[in-house]
Each structure stands twice: as structure tokens, then as C-alpha cells.
């Protein structure tokens, strides 16, 4: 009986959230309600409801656990149960109302729902905030509105509680009664999880930003309206503003001037102080440039100590071809996919801010981000296309990539045949890349720059590898017994090999059809866990080179190793200036925070790690190790931090632009 009361009151939070969503759309929406279209609005409210249940489900669970279950054993407590339930739900609804007004005021000032700027408020002048609230946002009326709002909430709650309950099942048999009671109890708990996980019992399928229906998310305003206020607050609190973003401008200015002394601070764009002048082309200008970004394409399986695994044989064969140059000590621009991608496309370090989700970078003026990859390739006369094996919902690519300067943006499910098999990340690599090649052939009327991002080298590695000719026994005749017994690890090894073969088959096809092409192959980041610890080596510890370094190799018929000056070190930020120095005409101006691989590089410094010719270090863990690969355990030095000033300057450049979005608008 108490459970039924919990269910009735649990209707109110999602109902209020839907009402608040409607008010937000009506008040701030750039269109009238009927102009949105019923389908868009349906999916906006439908997805918003399920996503909001991540919190609203607790409005059902907490009274169930705190009131209903104890009330079964305590008659006096049961008697006051409705009062306690109503008090709790009213308090929860008041929290929702506070957050609703927070969003309304926030959107009024920032044209966005609750975001990280909210956290800057703790350093603001509180009197000034109060003045704005009462005199600009009619704060007095807002506070008075809480009185009728609370009265309405209590009234609605009482009406729901007064609805006659369904009689409880009562059986003569004691054993059957216990069975029914037990099933009822288990069902009540299962119901909570079903609602909280978005109408499913699988936690992995919980609603999240990347899964907002494309028909909704393609509209920036409706995409924002989908997010309940508690969800928006949770996102902010889970991703607090880093200290380098909160730095005052004077300290940031002094830091940035260490890298670009001409930086003045006020209304100045630090990226415009990284101008380079190309010395003239070193290779014949290619008609096609293929920039291939392999998911989790890390350096470890290329190292000689892992040769017997034969995971990267396809790439290793390509690296041996004339015109291919490889750098085996190469750092990524981010440690996860989104941050690495943002760094590559914008030409500035993401610094774990996930700039692809920052709406200021969805509406930027690409000319004010002069370091952007696509923007500079277009100045060289290339038509730029971005290809991703998954949905463009992921990472808000549908908004971010066009803003980063690309002429075309394609997601695998949109151009691959309907029903193409795919993982939760994207269409299987061989199908995806075959379709990319087919479309490229049909549109070949001008010089083309293609940025191609794969997805299949990723957990849970459940592709039918044997159907695609991959057998772990044949792949690794020297397979350790420990690995032979580990099916999960074996599938991961086959997944790495599968992704490599798919990528190199694409390169082979395009190279045969467009022999003058320039190919750049790298990974977004290294594998996140120890990749090969199943008896392959004497050691079990993961080296920093294995957890940090990604692969890099570049190919063109005219390219020779001496053109890269014999460099042994490199990073993602060296790639764009290298392209420019290879193909740009003499005197061409381009922008890059880092130098090209044509110039000597004695160290690499990123916001995450540093590297010299003999050692590599992690800033997060404050450790360093030898850079060279090793089959034996290596010595780890603790408490090591090098090049901190340079790292700080690189991060402050990003922090400055995030703190001053008007510079890039």
C-alpha cells in the first residue's frame, strides 16, 4: 500500500521537469511551438524524460526505502508515512524549481543552459550578483513565486495520495503469501533501476548527451532544452573548471608571453602570434591528402619486443615501403578520443576541456582560430572532408567539426548501407572505409583533404573476427599459454590486428588509384590499459611509452627520411606544420603552436607529458622512465616534473580563449 503512494508522488518530478522544459522553449525558443514540428518536440520531451529519470527515479526510491519498507514493521511510522512522503517530494520539487530559475537567468545572461561558468560565481562580487538578480532579473517576484509554487506542489501531492489504492493481494497460504510479498519487493526495486537506466536494465544504455536523437541534437536550442536542470548541474560538477582556466588574466598573460612575447592581453588572440613562413615545397603537391586517425592506434604493438604478436604486420609492411617515414616516439594531443581530436582539429591543446562540447566553439569565426587544420588546408586550395565511422552525435561532431572549418562532415551510419553491422561506437571499419573510398571516387573534381577517423579498435571487441579471416592461433603461433586461456584478451588482440588491416587495405586502395597522395597515419591516443601482459614479456608493469605514445608514419612518393631531419621525437601538434612545410609555396603564411618535423626537436612538451631523447615523464603521476622500449622491468623515478613553465604556457593559451570566447566569435 505504501509502495502505491510512492509511485503516485513519483509522477510529479518528471511532470514538473516537462513543464519547465516547455516554459523554457516557449520563452527563449527562436521559433514558435508549432514551427519546431511535432516529431522534434516529441523526441525532445521523450528523451528528456528518460534522461531526467537518472535523478527523478530517486524521488520514488528514497520514500520506498525510508518510509514504505520501515512502515511495514512500524505501524505508528506507517500512519505518518504520507506526511513524510509529501514533505520529501515537495522539498525535491523546490530544488527543481530553484534550478529551473537558475537556468532561466543563466540563459538570459549567457545564452546557454547551466555550464561551467556557474562555478566562476564563487569568485564574483556577491553584492553585484544580488544587484543583478533583484534589479535586472526581477528577483523579488521570483522569490515570491515560491509561495504559490509550494502550495501547488502540496495540493497536487495531496490529490495524488487521495486516489484510492488497489487492494493488496491476500492469500490463505502463508508460503504463497511470502512468495507474493517477495516478488512484490523485488519488483519494486527492479522498477527503480528500469526507470533510472532509461527504460532498460542495462546501465551502459543509460541516456547521455552523445545519444540525444540526431533530429533533436542537430538543432542547438532543442538539444539544450532536452537536458534537465539537475542533469546539467551534474555535468558541471563532474567536470569542474580546472585551475588554469580560473587563473586571473594578468598571471595568464605573463605565462603566455613566455611563448609569444608579442602577446598584449587585452582583446588579443594568442593564436595569431604563432605565424610561420613556409620555406617552399619539398614534395610534389598531392591532389589527395589522407589524414588517417586510427582509434587507439598506439605505439606499443610496433615495438620490437612485441614482434611475435604480429598485430601490426600490415602497417609494418607499409612502413618499409619507399616514401614512408616513421617516428616511433610520438605523443598524442590528448589522452582520450575527444580531447585528442579537438587538439588536432583546432591546433590548440584541448587540455581535457573537451572543447568539442563547448558551444562557444560551435559558433566561432574560423578565421579567428588561425591554427585550425581544415581552415589552413582550404587556404592551400583543398576541399576538406571529415569522415567518422560512428554517429555525428558522438562528441557533438555535427556542430563542432563544421565550426572547425570542414566543408563536409560524414558519419558512418549516414552513408554506409542500411543495416551495416556496427559496434556501439560505429560501423565496422572495413565496411566504413570501403564506403568512404567509394564516395571519394565519385567526387574527384578538385584537390581533396580527407580526415578519416576509425572506431573498431575499441572494447568490447565482439566483432566476428574469424569470419574476417582472423584466427588468434594462426596469428600468433608463439602465443603464451596464459593468453591462450584468455578469450577476452585474445579478442582484443584480434581487434587490434583487424583495425590495422582495414586501415592499410584502405591505404593500399587509395595509393593504387591516387599514387601521388600524401598519407598521414597516427592514433588518437594510446591504449588505456596494459595491452600485453599475458606472459608475452618477462615484466608485467606497463611502461610510460606504452601508456602514452601513439603511432605515426607519413608517406609520399617524394618523401625521404632526411626531410624530417632525423628526428626521433614528435607529437600531434607537429603534424600540421609538417604538412605545410612539405607542400606550401615559399612565403606562405601558416599558424602553428609547434614547429614542423623538418626542424630539430630535442624535447616534446604537452599538457599531459614530456619527452626527451632518453626519457619520458607523466605530469599527472609525476614520474619518469627511460624512453627506449624494454622487455625487462624498468626503473621509475618519482617526483619528477620537467618543463613546467612551458607546459603552463601551453595550457594558459587554451584557458585564455575559453575564458574570453568573445575573441573567437
Image (tube, rainbow, N blue to C red):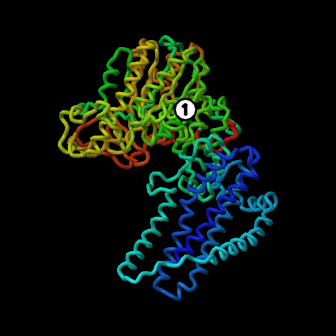
x and y percentages locating residue 568 in the rendered image: 37, 27
Residue in front for this viewpoint, 369 or 421? 421
The residue sitting at 71% across, 48% down in the picture is 111
Relative vertical location of residue 478 with respect to residue 485 in this rendering, above or below? above
Would you name the residue on which mark 1 appears? 345
Whether residue 574 can be seen here: yes
Task: Identify the element where label 1 is drawn.
Answer: helix
Q: Is residue 401 left or right of residue 621?
A: right
The residue sitting at 52% across, 30% down in the picture is 415
Q: Quadrant of residue 218?
A: top right
Q: Looking at this view, name the residue that lies furthest to the front.
A: 172
Relative vertical location of residue 392 with respect to residue 436 in this rendering, above or below? below
Whether residue 563 can be seen here: no
Relative vertical location of residue 607 with respect to residue 470 in this rendering, above or below? below
The residue sitting at 22% across, 43% down in the picture is 483
Residue in front for this viewpoint, 297 or 549? 297
Q: Quadrant of residue 520?
A: top left
Numbered marks: total: 1
Residue in front for this viewpoint, 629 or 318? 318
Amino acid at each position: 500500500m505504501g509502495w502505491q503512494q510512492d509511485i503516485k508522488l513519483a509522477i510529479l518530478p518528471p511532470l514538473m521537469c516537462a513543464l519547465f522544459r516547455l516554459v523554457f522553449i516557449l520563452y527563449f525558443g527562436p521559433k514558435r511551438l508549432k514551427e519546431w514540428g511535432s516529431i522534434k518536440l516529441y523526441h525532445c520531451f521523450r528523451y528528456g524524460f528518460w534522461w531526467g529519470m537518472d535523478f527523478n527515479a530517486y524521488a520514488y526510491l528514497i520514500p520506498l526505502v525510508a518510509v514504505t519498507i520501515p512502515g511495514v514493521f512500524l505501524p505508528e511510522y506507517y500512519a505518518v508515512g504520507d506526511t513524510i512522503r509529501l514533505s520529501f517530494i515537495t522539498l525535491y520539487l523546490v530544488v527543481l524549481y530553484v534550478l529551473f530559475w537558475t537556468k532561466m537567468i543563466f540563459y538570459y545572461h549567457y545564452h546557454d543552459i547551466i555550464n561551467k561558468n556557474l562555478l566562476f560565481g564563487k569568485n564574483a562580487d556577491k553584492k553585484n550578483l544580488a544587484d543583478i538578480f533583484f534589479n535586472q532579473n526581477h528577483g523579488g517576484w521570483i522569490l515570491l513565486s515560491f509561495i504559490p509554487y509550494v502550495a501547488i506542489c502540496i495540493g497536487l501531492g495531496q490529490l495524488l495520495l487521495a486516489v484510492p489504492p488497489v487492494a493488496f493481494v491476500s492469500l490463505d497460504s502463508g508460503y504463497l503469501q511470502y512468495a507474493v510479498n517477495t516478488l512484490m519487493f523485488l519488483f519494486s526495486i527492479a522498477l527503480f533501476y528500469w526507470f533510472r537506466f532509461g527504460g532498460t536494465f542495462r546501465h551502459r544504455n543509460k541516456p547521455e548527451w552523445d545519444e540525444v536523437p540526431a533530429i533533436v541534437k542537430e538543432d542547438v536550442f532543442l538539444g539544450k532544452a532536452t537536458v534537465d536542470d539537475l542533469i546539467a548541474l551534474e555535468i558541471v560538477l563532474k567536470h569542474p573548471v580546472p585551475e588554469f582556466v580560473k587563473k586571473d588574466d594578468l598571471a595568464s598573460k605573463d605565462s603566455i608571453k613566455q611563448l609569444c612575447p608579442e602577446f598584449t592581453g587585452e582583446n588579443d588572440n594568442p593564436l595569431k602570434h604563432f605565424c610561420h613562413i613556409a620555406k617552399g615545397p619539398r614534395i610534389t603537391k598531392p591532389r589527395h591528402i589522407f589524414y588517417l586517425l586510427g582509434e587507439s592506434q598506439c605505439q606499443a604493438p610496433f615495438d620490437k619486443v612485441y614482434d611475435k604478436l604480429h598485430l601490426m604486420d600490415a602497417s609494418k609492411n607499409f612502413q618499409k615501403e619507399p616514401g614512408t617515414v616513421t617516428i616511433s616516439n610520438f605523443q598524442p594531443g590528448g589522452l582520450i578520443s575527444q580531447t585528442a581530436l579537438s587538439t588536432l582539429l583546432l591546433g590548440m591543446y584541448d587540455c581535457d576541456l573537451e572543447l568539442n562540447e563547448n558551444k562557444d566553439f560551435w559558433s566561432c569565426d574560423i578565421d579567428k582560430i588561425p591554427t585550425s587544420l581544415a581552415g589552413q588546408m582550404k587556404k592551400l586550395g583543398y576541399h576538406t572532408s571529415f569522415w567518422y565511422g560512428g554517429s555525428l552525435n558522438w562528441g557533438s561532431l555535427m556542430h563542432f567539426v563544421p565550426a572547425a572549418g570542414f566543408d563536409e562532415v560524414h558519419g558512418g551510419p549516414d552513408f554506409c548501407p542500411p543495416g551495416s553491422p556496427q559496434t556501439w561506437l560505429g560501423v565496422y571499419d572495413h565496411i566504413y572505409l570501403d564506403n568512404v573510398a567509394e564516395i571519394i571516387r565519385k567526387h574527384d573534381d578538385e584537390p581533396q583533404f580527407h580526415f578519416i577517423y576509425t572506431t573498431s579498435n575499441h572494447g568490447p571487441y565482439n566483432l566476428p573476427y574469424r569470419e574476417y579471416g582472423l584466427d588468434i592461433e594462426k596469428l600468433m603461433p608463439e602465443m603464451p599459454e596464459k593468453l591462450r586461456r584468455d578469450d577476452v584478451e585474445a579478442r582484443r588482440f584480434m581487434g587490434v590486428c583487424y583495425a590495422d588491416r582495414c586501415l592499410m587495405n584502405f591505404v593500399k586502395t587509395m595509393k593504387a588509384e591516387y599514387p601521388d597522395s600524401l598519407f598521414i597515419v597516427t592514433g588518437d591516443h594510446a591504449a588505456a590499459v596494459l595491452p600485453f601482459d599475458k606472459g608475452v614479456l618477462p615484466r608485467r608493469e606497463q611502461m610510460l611509452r606504452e601508456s602514452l605514445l601513439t603511432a605515426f608514419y607519413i608517406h609520399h612518393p617524394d618523401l625521404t627520411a632526411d626531410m624530417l631531419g632525423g628526428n626521433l621525437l614528435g607529437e600531434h601538434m607537429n603534424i600540421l606544420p609538417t604538412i605545410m612545410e612539405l607542400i606550401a609555396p615559399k612565403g606562405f603564411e601558416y599558424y602553428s603552436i609547434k614547429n614542423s618535423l623538418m626542424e630539430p626537436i630535442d624535447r616534446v612538451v604537452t599538457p599531459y607529458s614530456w619527452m626527451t631523447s632518453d626519457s619520458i615523464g607523466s605530469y599527472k603521476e609525476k614520474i619518469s622512465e627511460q624512453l627506449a622500449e624494454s622487455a625487462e622491468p624498468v626503473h621509475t623515478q618519482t617526483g619528477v616534473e620537467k618543463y613546467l613553465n612551458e607546459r603552463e604556457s601551453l595550457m594558459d593559451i587554451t584557458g585564455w580563449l575559453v575564458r574570453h570566447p568573445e575573441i573567437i566569435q
